[in-house]
Image (spheres, rainbow, N blue to C red):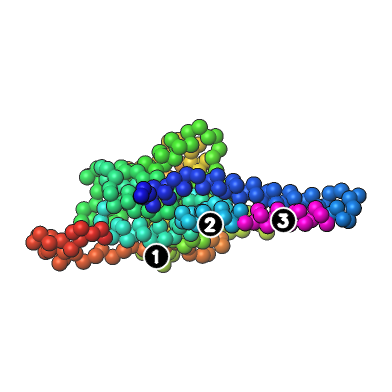
């Protein structure tokens, strides 16, 4: 008996599922064409029309059975219907820096649970490490998501020490830039690719509604972020210049330095893919002043009047800057020193 690895089958299935989708679309197209024939040729006799109707219905039933069969194949390999029914949607490219820590897999699992509900999403996960880890590789392999796995280490002098405040050094800069460079290499031959780029840290909480809001981004879209900057919410201030005019962002409601050019958190904006690719010099900078990483990046792309306010004119919170509490590892450290770690032989 030949044993087939289910992960191998799934990978192969994901390669040919677009052909299954095309089959579904062709079947539905043919189905529509047959019904359109019924309205053509008013001079055809009533009997002939009835015969045509009967034949058409028989073919429709046969086509419906084929569609049901094709859908069952896609379901068998855990390919969500939203993924193949929305093949024309602009893809959202989510760039996420990540690093090794006790709760890394827990954080990534939370993100995966959201991303699985978002059609046409490609996850670019970039490890802050000299090489890809087995934990992240295995996690992505079985995630059911479209993904790219990268790695880029941060030099030791730029890493946070255990007693450093989170804001004292820029984090994830080189990893986000690695994701941007991957996009530039992927679309090097495309003049105007369709898509949206979003920088989603792995310690935040995201609503699926957020991705619906950002998908139509033409320049840079913005929205509120909850629980950030020492306040309940940071958000763009939006005005309507005239009754029929487009709403405009005119400033920022923030607790810390609201006078920043773009007083937003990393989770508070998305960028049109084509716009980003047209400016090959635009990246995040390690030399940005504390709190100005987002501003230094965005001012290379747009001015404030070009921003697109989302989430009901920036009055609805769809993302929260939550951080997982550092787990208490006191007893784990004691057991490790004794040579008896609790996670020996098991991945947490």
Is residue 132 visible to us here?
yes
Residue 294 at least partly seen = no
Instruction: Specify whether residue 58 is painted magenta.
Output: yes
* Label disc, if present, on residue 166 of the rendered structure: none
Q: CA distance from mark 2 to mark 1?
A: 43 Å
Instruction: Using residue 208 as the reference point, say whether residue 152 is left or right of it.
Output: left
Q: Secondary structure at mark 3?
A: helix
Residue 114 in which image quadrant: bottom left
The mark tally for this picture is: 3
Q: Nearer the viewer, mark 3 or mark 2?
A: 3
Q: Nearer the viewer, residue 292 or 175?
A: 175
Tag of residue 58: 3
Q: Position of residue 31 (x, y in %)?
A: 70, 51
| Residue beneath disc 1 | 227
Q: Secondary structure at mark 1?
A: strand
State whether the magenta stretch is mostly helix, strand or loop: helix
Looking at marks 3 and 2 on the same chain, the residue that comes earlier in the sequence is marked by 3
Label 3: how many Cα within 10 Å (few below 14, some 14–19, many 20+): few
Mark 1: give few (<14), some (14-19) or many (20+) Cα within 10 Å: some
Instruction: Give the position of the C terminus as an image quadrant.
Output: bottom left
In this rendering, position of residue 72 left or right of residue 320: right
Q: Which residues are magenta?
A: 50-65
What residue is shown with label 2?
72
Q: Is residue 166 left or right of residue 22?
A: left
Rendered location of residue 86, percent (x, y): 57, 52
In front: 1, or 265?
1
Instruction: Report the residue at 83% width, 57% height from top.
Output: 50
Q: Is residue 48 magenta?
A: no
Foreground pick, 206 / 290: 206
- Front: mark 2 or 1: 2
């Amino acid at each position: 008996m030949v044993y087939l690895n289910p992960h191998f089958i799934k990978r192969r299935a994901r390669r040919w599922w677009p052909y299954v989708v095309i089959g579904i679309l062709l079947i539905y197209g043919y189905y529509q064409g047959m019904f359109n024939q019924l309205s053509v040729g008013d001079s055809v006799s009533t009997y002939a029309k009835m015969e045509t109707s009967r034949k058409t219905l028989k073919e429709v039933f046969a086509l419906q059975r084929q569609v049901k069969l094709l859908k069952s194949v896609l379901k068998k390999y855990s390919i969500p219907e939203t993924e193949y029914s929305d093949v024309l949607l602009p893809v959202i490219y989510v760039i996420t820096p990540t690093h090794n820590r006790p709760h890394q897999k827990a954080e990534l699992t939370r993100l995966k649970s959201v991303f699985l509900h978002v059609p046409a999403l490609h996850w670019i996960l970039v490890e802050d490490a000299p090489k890809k880890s087995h934990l992240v590789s295995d996690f992505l392999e079985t995630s059911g998501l479209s993904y790219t796995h990268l790695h880029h280490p941060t030099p030791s002098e730029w890493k946070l020490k255990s007693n450093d405040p989170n804001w004292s050094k820029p984090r994830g800069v080189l990893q986000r830039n690695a994701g941007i460079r991957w996009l530039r290499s992927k679309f090097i031959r495309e003049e105007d690719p369709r898509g949206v780029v979003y920088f989603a840290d792995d310690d935040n909480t995201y609503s699926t509604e957020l991705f619906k809001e950002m998908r139509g981004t033409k320049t840079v879209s913005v929205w509120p972020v909850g629980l950030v900057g020492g306040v309940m919410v940071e958000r763009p201030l939006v005005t309507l210049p005239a009754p029929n005019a487009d709403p405009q962002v005119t400033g920022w409601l923030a607790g810390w330095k609201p006078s920043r050019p773009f007083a937003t958190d990393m989770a508070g904006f998305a960028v049109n893919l084509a716009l980003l690719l047209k400016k090959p010099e635009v990246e995040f900078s390690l030399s940005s002043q504390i709190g100005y990483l987002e501003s230094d990046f965005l001012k290379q792309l747009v001015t404030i009047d070009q921003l697109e306010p989302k989430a009901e004119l920036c009055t609805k919170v769809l993302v929260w800057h939550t951080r997982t509490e550092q787990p208490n590892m006191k007893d784990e450290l004691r057991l490790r020193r004794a040579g008896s770690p609790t996670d020996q032989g098991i991945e947490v």
